[in-house]
Image (cartoon, rainbow, N blue to C red):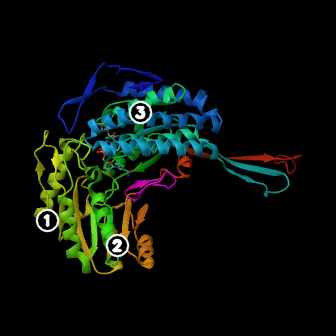
Amino acid sequence: MWIDGKSVPARSGKTFLRESPGHGITVGEYPLADRHDVDSAVAAARRAFDTGPWPLLSGADRSKVLWQTAEIIRARKEDLALTETLESGKPIKQARDEMEWSAALWDYAGALCRHLHGDSYNSLGSQVLALTVREPIGVVAMITPWNFPLLIISQKLPFALAAGCSAVIKPSELTPGTTLKLGEILAEAGLPDGVVNIVSGYGDPSGIALSEHPEIDMISFTGSTEVGKAVVGASQRNLKKVELELGGKNPHLVFADADLEAALDAVVFGVYFNMGECCNSGSRLLVQNDIADEFVSRVIETAKRIPVGDPLDERTKIGAIIDENQFNKILGYIESGNRAGARLRVGGGQLPQVTGRFIEPTVFDAVQPEMAIAREEIFGPVLSILTFDTKEEAIRIANSTIYGLSAGVWTRDIDTAFAVSRGIRAGTIWINTFMDGYPELCFGGFKQSGLGRELGRFSIEEFTELKSIQVHLGPRTNLWAR
Ligand code: NDP
């Protein structure tokens, strides 16, 4: 683990192993944290925050550390991408892209270090001047999932550091490798000891211990909606601030007047990227009835051609499923689609490569909005296709889940594009594109997809408290006890 600027074993001496989902061999052995290790990590983060120097440095000095971190991530891209692929099963090319996106977030947050400002009030009367200042919220716990390990921690940590916070991180026990390497990278970049601490281990007990911990001021969680709710419950112990990035069942709407060639590619990318293990996965295709038959046939033809296999093969576009639980969950949803009367048009089965933990790109059509495969997050390479006649009907179906993370709309009609963008209750809308992202644009969910926002200039504010400072100028009149 990484505690107080040092690589340390668990206090119990216990470890756990990680096996590559695509190769079936052991690729990592990590310390198994318990509550004592969490306490040590929190104590180090608390000291680093309460006694400095990090929160007291100028924004300019903090930015140097963040920019240097971005540089080292780029320099170590191959090593980090390999770790990510071996632990997560994702294709190596996609892992390399993830390292570039992560570095870009450190760059952007580096610039934000110098933009943490508040308001001044010079209109409160001749004897008053007041300021509203932003201060770092304190020690932030960050709990992250396994699907984009370095990217997701890079959506949180640099912004918290930019604000002057310290942190304790618990990556998923399935993919701790790159997050632990980030500890070394930060030390090399000049981050003072104790500002970032990383504990490797399971949600129970480490994640729970962090969520409950009285010495933590804020928790930033990315993961499932179900665990997010448990984190909110545990956080009540000391009323810590909670920021949540949770699941999605994102609709991809294709209207008859769209550039169908471009839409086709985006639909297939949107659902099969990262094996569909993606909160932004475009797992529901809503296609206008006039073009449905032809468009769906083309989606099926394209899905059949996508190379599935060894994550280390440069040609692979769909790698291995993360673990046995997730694998069985996906197959369970495929079975549920069949049982509910949706039509399985392609895929639906397991591929026999090495570990056997590969699932064919799968397409269901004739899906009804009330079916589980239309409403619930599958987190696998499974596309559920529904149809609509009017934009009002499309918006109604798009909004008919508990989630509201993102949505895509394909049309050449600007009125339709904006009516849909306004009508869909989701944190991100893509018009004639899908799953693009920029550090400048905030990201987060409506409804049960989350609380708060990451990225963009507002994200640094999530990691701050507001404080009002009032100054009385000149002699005091109107004394109360007089
Ligand atoms: P989980 O919710 O199962 O786990 C997320 C993290 O929480 C892991 O580190 C996990 O540890 C930990 N954890 C588990 N139980 C608890 C608990 N009771 N208290 C505190 N922490 C706990 O999600 P997955 O890792 O399975 O990731 C998939 C989910 O993440 C999907 O639902 C997906 O939509 C969502 N996600 C959302 C994103 C977004 O930005 N909106 C982005 C990426 C994923 P352990 O691994 O040991 O269980």
Residue 79: x and y, percent? 36, 32
Please give the residue where the numbered disc 3 appears in the rendered image: 76
Amino acid on which disc 2 is placed: Asp
Q: Which residue is mark 2?
A: 259
Q: Is residue 451 above or below residue 20?
A: below
State the SS at label 1: strand
- Image label count: 3
Image depth: mark 2 or mark 1 in front: 2
* Nearer to us in this view, 242 or 331: 331
Q: Residue 118: x, y in percent?
A: 67, 50
Q: Residue at x 57, y 44 (%)?
A: 464
Residue 6 covered by magenta stretch: no
Q: Nearer the viewer, mark 3 or mark 1?
A: 3
* Magenta stretch in the rendered image: 436-451
The label shown at residue 345 is 1
> Which callout, 2 or 1, points at the residue further toward the start of the chain?
2
Q: Relative to 20, say whether 151 is above or below.
A: below
Residue 449 included in the magenta stretch of the image: yes
Percent position (x, y) of residue 106? 50, 41
Alpha carbon of mark 2 to alpha carbon of mark 1: how far? 24 Å
Distance in Å between CA atoms under marks 2 and 3: 39 Å
